[in-house]
Image (cartoon, grey):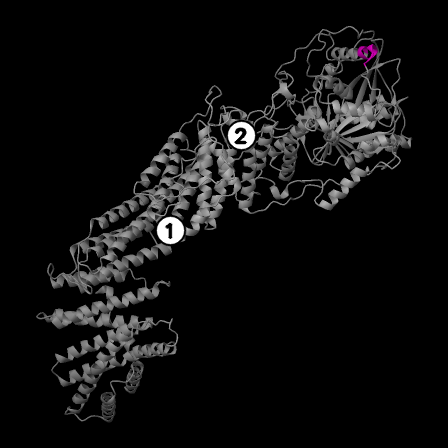
Amino acid sequence: MSSQDKTTDSDPRHEEDQSITAALRAVVKYSAAPPPSSYALLQEKTDLKLPPANWLRENAQLGTAGTTVLGSSRKSKPFTRYHYYFTCMYSADAFILSDLRSISKLLKIPYSKSHVSMAVHRVGSTLLLDELDIQELFMRSSQTGDWTWLKEFYQRLIDQKWQRKKKSKEQWNEKAILSKFLYYSINSDGTAVPVPSDTEQATEEGCGTAAEGPSWPATYNSSTTESEGSAIPKEVDTYTLGHVSSVSKEQNLPTLFNEGENSQGLRNDFVRNILWTFEDIHMLVGSNMPIFGGGRYPAVSLRLRDNNKPINVLTGIDYWLDNLMCNVPELVMCFHVNGIVQKYEMIKTEDIPDLENSMFSTRVVKDIAQNILSFLKSNCTKEGHTYWLFKASGSDIVKLYDLTTLCEEAAEEKCQNPFTLPVAVLLYKVASNMMLKKRNYGTIRTLLLNCIKLLDEERHPQIIASAHYMLAELFQLDDVSEDEGNGESLRGGGSEDSYSDEEEEEEEEEEDESCSYSTSSEPQDDSKAVAVIKSVVELSVPEKYKSTHQIRPNCAFPVSQDKEEKCRLVLSYVLKGLKAVDNSIKKESDLPAADPSTPIPLKYEERSENGARDVEKEIALLLDRGQSPHPFTSSETVTTRSGMLPGTWQHRMKLQLFLKASKAYFVLSDAAANLLKYGRALRYIKLALQCHDGYCSISGGLHPQVLLFHCQCLSLCGDVQLMLAQNASNRAAYLEEYNYQTKDDQEILHCLHRESSCQAFSMATDLASDPEYQLIVSSKCYEAAHDLLTSGVLKDLGQEQLGQVLKRLGNICNEMGVFYMNQAAAMQAERQGVRRSVCVAEQELWKKSFSCFEKGMQDFNAISDSVNTALLLCNIGRLMRICAQAHCVATSEHSRDEFSPEEALYYNKAIDYYQRALKSLGCREGHSAVWDSVNWELSTTYFTLATLLQDYAPLSRKAQEQIEREVTESMMKSLRYCDLQTESARQPLYQYRAATIHHRLASMYHSCYRNQVGDESVRKQHKALAEQHYSKAVRLFISLSEAPCELLRTLLERVAFAEFTMAGQNSSAVKLKTLTGALEIMCETRHAFKLIHKELLEQQEKASDSSSSSELNTEEVVKLTGIFEPSFSFLLLQLIKLSTASKRKLSGKEEEQVKIYKNVYSRLLRAEKSIPLIQRVSLFMELLDQLKPPTGSDEARSSSRESNPKDSSAS
């Protein structure tokens, strides 16, 4: 073996070629070939005409190279040979996609006189090039008739004397020798080496297999042998569904085609796929060239040459491009004479352009590539169209035709475009692969829409249905935000058309029609050409052709972010998919034909008391159906209602479409509920459940993920029914929303009715007028969801959702308990003032309410929800208070019997439940609002109990002392739960209640002191307690400043208490002291009168405003002033009498005070009784102001007197 070394370092052209070579970059994206192994060096004089023992046997080292050279490879339709690696490797980085042979033929156009025939198609920003074998197609047209119009066009405009050219015997011999040489070279002894049939080769950057689990089906089947597909990943064309749309493996969609009919099998005709980059040229190229290696030569290519024939430029370009694009640094040339091996020669790849007789400039080759690709990019602009690049033998003119347009112009064969199906399938498969990567959603949408445009629904329903389903799947309805976890949403998708602006698109079409590269002097025969290269010499001129058509890069296309609009788009795609499936089913349904323009009524009706049982039966049947774990198997032959067989593509596609529609309606219902459009929400959830019913009708069992989604639907249905029950006043508006239907909704319902009656959830989704029925339906929906989630299938999967359902169950139990409780309270209010016992209906309502509350507590306890448990306990406490009020026996409208033991029983039960609620909460921190609410209710219950005991004392059953003791105990407990320190909205209420408690206790001790006979120590204790509670009551009422009447009443009672005390005193000095103290208390009423006077003035100012209301009780003020005036007069008169009757001479200061008493008393007596109330109050204030206190203000004295007694709780 010799090598060829040339010293060309000083050659500028060689330096330029080396720099160009260095700028090239090739990355292997996929490889099914084994690691390179060393080739066998054949001995000199080896006869290559003799076949080796392993000849034509499949070999991983050679791939298909050993057989294709003999023409034994299967012929395929346009583009099909690239389906596999194009769908796997589709990338925006590569805008040219072809095989190495086609690229080489393009770049040799200026050097070769042979014909060039290639089909070109644009997918997004990528141009796909494939050889269009005219001779093979025309030979096939005599059998199929597919290409008759093209044959006629070819003969008429291009080659009128066309005939098939047969290959010479010498050409066949050369190919046979090359094949035998390659088989000899894979091993030295000439024996065949067996190759494993199941080889899985490592890839440097392979397609990647889809994740295990539920997935989109492999779109195409292939009848190729096992070894042919052995290097293909088994799930390369899969699309993983979302978690809601997930189904079991048995329910995956079937393959779209069988190999026999259309020959569209998913296979890889190339051993390796390479992303080749040079400056701004990017190509994804398929190659079958065998690569050898080992020892000093890690990678070499092997060539066979006739020693009598020198290497020409065309051969040199072939060798150079092959090695360059496959990253092979060296070439091994084996020379032979008549099949007899002569010698080997090693040539470096970079030296190939400088070989003798085959010298060429790599710069020129680069310019040719730049020009030809710019030419194609500028003129192959229509998405979905197939173009034909043609150069006749011996001609220098290159023409580009739009074959799609030419086919459409053939009047008799408009629907027989042979390019339609391959192109549409390619678009579909590219979109399917891109769905795996969850990116470029805009590009996916464009590809699928163009795929649908190319196909006839009657002839290709399966592809159309699948494409519409994928379009629906582009909208991720599972997540609130589409950007989360998807990498790219629809907002960042690809181009939808070539231009974003319609004017630019029209201008480009005009340029295409005027043929950018044609002139008016072109012959008439070229009128059908889209563009023409007038001379191949132009391709060698740098930048002769520049791309004038800018393919729009990935950018956003307008997709509304409105959730309802997205779901409507999804439903439109689902509907089109369902129509495609239904049209493909041969057997017509037994159902009468439905008119899509006639709405299907969504019935609503009044429900009887048996409504709850009916709903329960419905949902029980559903649960029985959902528990079946096994879907249809392929062995089953029972047809569905529409005539489908389980396991067919129609069956599986309908499953997916029904599920997607159900999900879309669920999202619509949830959005409507959030907008408080509950009638619309109920309509949508009804449609969602009808879709689910249709799904169940054709599916033998439900996948766990489907069951989980169904639980969500049931929960949402329960939510909507609950909200409808709570907003019964808006029923008319909700009914209008519920009955509205869009055309798509009607047509989807008609599609559903082909498979199911859709009545499984009719009662659960009806709009009833009875709130009780709606609450029952809501409860049953939650219970059904709970039963599903606790079943064996979902026991481990739905724990998070189970917690939410349990909370909903607890909530609906609370709502139903409150509903029955309010009904009982309303019934009680109707018989108010009527003397009768509790009726049976009222007791039944109590029992229902109590049962619901208890059930709700069980649900909340199951999820350790202490806050909601406390609220339910609080509601039970309220129920007990209602029961207590019901047992109050009224004798007339304003009077009643004494406090009964039944009332005491229920009030004590209420107290017990409130205390349990506080215990459930534990402490105020973290639940302050709930804690304060329960605390207030507990204080109120104690206060009510004490008040009733005090006002309607059961003297017939208990002694006075016992009643007083119980009243005091209950009052003090109520006082204990009055939170006076914490600043909150309830603080004034707590202060008012505490003041009232002290006032009532003071009044009780006052009464005991007046009526007590006998033990003087007890009387003294009652007197001290009365003084203590009066003092605290006054202090609290003064701090409120919003209870002047209560303050005035308390002070007057305190004065009366002092007067009663004075009546029992004998000494004049002691009486005088007591009266003086009573007068000081009377002077404290000035604060109450000031507040009353202020409110009376406000009443006068607002008298003209009829809508204004005052909180001041004028009648109460009149009554209190009637008590105040005689009491005040009596005090003044007694003080004057005692002061003047004293034997002791008065001091000057005392005489002055007596004069003031007389003056005030005189004015009080002379005051007119008929003057207005506000003037009387003003007079009282003026008179009280004249009685100056000896020291400080009345508030100061009051505070000083109140500082001594201990806290009331100590008593």
Residue 169 colored magenta? Answer: yes
What residue did someone put label 1 on? 726
Q: Which image quarter holds the N terminus?
A: top right
Numbered disc 1: secondary structure: helix
Residue 375 colored magenta? Answer: no
Q: Which residues are magenta?
A: 166-173
Quadrant in which residue 1195 is drawn: bottom left
Q: Nearer the viewer, mark 1 or mark 2?
A: 2
Q: Which mark is residue 953?
A: none
In the image shown, does 537 or 589 lie closer to the viewer? 589
Q: Residue at x 65, y 13 (%)?
A: 195
Numbered disc 2: secondary structure: helix
**Kind of residue at badge 1:** Gln
Quadrant in which residue 482 is drawn: top right
884 displayed left or right of 290: left
Quadrant in which residue 44 is drawn: top right
- The percent position of residue 219, horizontal first and vertical second, equals 60, 26
Please tell me whether residue 217 is drawn above or below residue 1 in the rendered image: below
- The percent position of residue 534, horizontal first and vertical second, equals 87, 32
User: What is the tally of numbered marks visible in this picture?
Assistant: 2
Q: Residue at x 91, y 30 (%)?
A: 11
> Are circles 1 and 2 on residues that touch, CB within 8 Å?
no
Q: Residues within 10 Å of mark 2 (few under 14, many from 20)?
A: many
Please tell me whether residue 261 is drawn above or below residue 44 in the rendered image: below
Q: Main secondary structure of the magenta part?
A: helix
Q: CA distance from mark 1 to mark 2?
A: 42 Å
**Kind of residue at badge 2:** Asp
- The percent position of residue 731, horizontal first and vertical second, equals 40, 51
933 displayed left or right of 581: left
In the image shown, does 989 or 302 lie closer to the viewer? 989
Q: Which mark is residue 582?
A: 2
